[in-house]
Amino acid sequence: MVERFSVSMNSELLKKFDEYIRRRGYVSRSEALRMLIRDALIEDSISADPEGVIFGTVTMIYDHSVKGITEKITHIQHSYHGEIRSAVHVHVDEKNCLEVVIFHGKAKKMRKLVDSLSRIKGVKNVKFVFTRVEP
């Protein structure tokens, strides 16, 4: 069953939202709102349940010339061998590497993984993206 409701917003915000919809290729405001609401509800459910199981990725850029960095990253990843499903390593340039780690595990534990990787000297950027299958 589909229910309708109205949303009020000022014209400037609506203009920005319509531009967002155009850039993202949504066919309607309703489709865009549904996706944004789903994303917000999933994020909220994960925050509310740190023991819940999530899927996600950790994407990081790091300077491989920093002494011992590769070994530190590998050591941390081995500590999460039950949760890490795959890792992809790409040489960005002569100094920098990009690594994407795909995981499946408890939200609380996966946040610890991200925190551990973020604290390594030479890691320049870490992005954590997560989701879960919602009924």
Image (cartoon, rainbow, N blue to C red):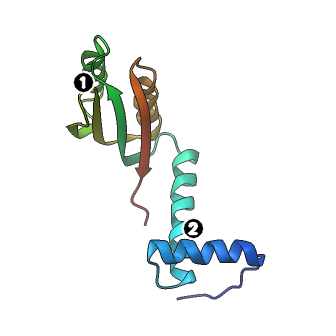
Q: Position of residue 12 (x, y in %)?
A: 74, 74
Q: Secondary structure at mark 2?
A: helix
Q: Who comes first in sequence, dot 2 or dot 1?
A: 2
Q: Secondary structure at mark 1?
A: helix
Q: Position of residue 48 (x, y in %)?
A: 58, 47
Q: CA distance from mark 2 to mark 1?
A: 35 Å
Figure check: 135 above or below 64: below
In front: 129, or 1?
A: 129
The type of residue carrying mark 2 is Ile
User: Residue 21 vs residue 15: left or right?
Assistant: left
In front: 97, or 9?
A: 97
> Residue, x 57% and y 60% (percent of image)?
40
The circle on residue 41 is none
Q: Position of residue 113 (x, y in %)?
A: 40, 29
Decide if residue 83 is in sight here.
no
According to the image, label 2 marks what residue?
Answer: 37
